[in-house]
Image: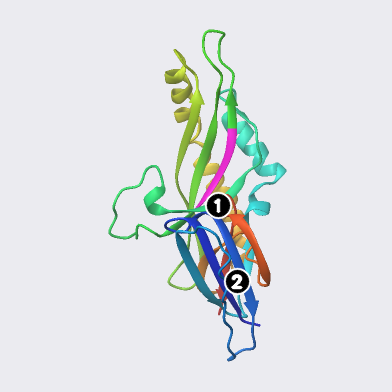
């Protein structure tokens, strides 16, 4: 059954805490949403979702013992992971390594995989705490095959002062890029199950892509992949 979904975002450009409401309706029938009690919101999205839609909640797919283990190996002694792995979306213009590109709209959505980390330092420096992110772009080939590429990475942290920030940053810059190839291999293997299928459209939805009811989610931290099969 088709679904009309409305999303209200706390921040501009489809970011932040998100209130949602989804209503199923008969094919060819009407559905409407009239809900004023949404608080202070700065952007909104309405999506008429077809009944052939397939939704994949991304966080449970990436926050697995195998992928956590690969990340821990990648970090080595440079940092300790202190959280699970989250998968939210982020518009291209807010990605730390953003630059204007003719092949990409500023509001094109990437998936941000990220986790928290901690770095122990010598007594004369404060310990560092932050997060490491990898950015994914899902797309369809001309033939309708599902693909994804690891687009880039970033890190951010607080602490390490007054003398250790340089060494912390250098260690992270040495270790994090090496995880891109490992992550790409994991993604390619995961998408292999879709090899025999063709799709007309791929897009992202907030949260777990609920098809009924209302709720709230931080889209920066959780999103789903949606596909329309041919």
Return the residue found at the far bottom. Answer: 28
Q: Answer whether labels 1 and 2 touch (C-beta < 8 Å).
A: no
Residue 44 to residue 101: above or below: below
Q: Which residue is mark 2?
A: 196
Label located before the other in sequence (1 or 2): 1
Range covered by the magenta-colored residues: 111-116
Quadrant location of the N terminus in the rendered image: bottom right
To which quarter of the image does residue 208 belong? bottom right
Residue 140: x %, y % from top left = 47, 67
**Helix, strand or loop at disc 2?**
loop
Q: Quadrant of the C terminus?
A: bottom right
Q: Is residue 230 above or below residue 36?
A: below
Along the horizontal axis of the image, is 172 left or right of 83? left
- Out of 3 and 82, give the one closest to the viewer: 3
- Mark in the foreground, 1 or 2: 1
Q: Does 112 appear in magenta?
A: yes
Residue extending farthest to the right is: 65
Name the spot of residue 5 as percent of width and height, x first.
57, 72
Pick the residue in front: 1 or 34.
Answer: 34
* Magenta segment, prevailing SS (helix, strand or loop): strand
Q: Position of residue 56 (x, y in %)?
A: 63, 63
For image coordinates 61% across by 59% down, the residue present is: 207
Q: Is 134 one of the magenta-colored residues?
A: no
Q: Which mark is residue 12?
A: none
Residue 68 spot, x, y in % from top left: 66, 39
Specify how the rendered protein is coloured.
rainbow
Q: Is residue 139 left or right of residue 113?
A: left
Q: Residues within 10 Å of mark 1 (few under 14, many from 20)?
A: many
Q: Residues within 10 Å of mark 2 (few under 14, many from 20)?
A: few
What whole-number distance in Å separates the C-alpha atoms at marks 1 and 2? 27 Å
Q: Nearer the viewer, residue 60 or 124?
A: 124
User: Which numbered disc covers residue 88?
Assistant: 1
């Amino acid at each position: 059954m088709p679904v009309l979904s409305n999303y209200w975002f706390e921040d501009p450009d489809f970011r932040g805490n998100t209130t949602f409401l989804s209503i199923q309706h008969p094919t060819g029938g009407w559905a409407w949403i009239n809900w004023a009690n949404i608080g202070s919101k700065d952007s909104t999205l309405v999506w008429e979702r077809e009944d052939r839609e397939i939704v994949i909640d991304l966080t449970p797919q990436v926050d697995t013992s195998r992928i956590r283990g690969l990340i821990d190996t990648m970090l080595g002694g440079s940092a300790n992971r202190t959280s699970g792995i989250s998968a939210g979306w982020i518009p291209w213009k807010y990605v730390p390594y953003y630059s204007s590109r003719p092949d990409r709209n500023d509001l094109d959505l990437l998936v941000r995989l990220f986790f928290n980390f901690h770095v122990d330092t010598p007594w004369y420096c404060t310990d560092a705490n932050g997060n490491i992110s990898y950015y994914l772009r899902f797309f369809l080939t001309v033939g309708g095959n599902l693909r994804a590429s690891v687009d880039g990475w970033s890190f951010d942290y607080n602490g390490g002062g007054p003398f250790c920030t340089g060494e912390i940053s250098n260690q992270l810059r040495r270790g994090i890029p090496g995880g891109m190839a490992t992550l790409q291999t994991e993604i390619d293997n995961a998408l292999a199950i879709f090899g025999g299928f063709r799709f007309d459209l791929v897009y992202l939805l907030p949260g777990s892509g609920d098809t009924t009811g209302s709720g709230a989610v931080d889209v920066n931290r959780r999103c789903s992949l949606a596909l329309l099969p041919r």
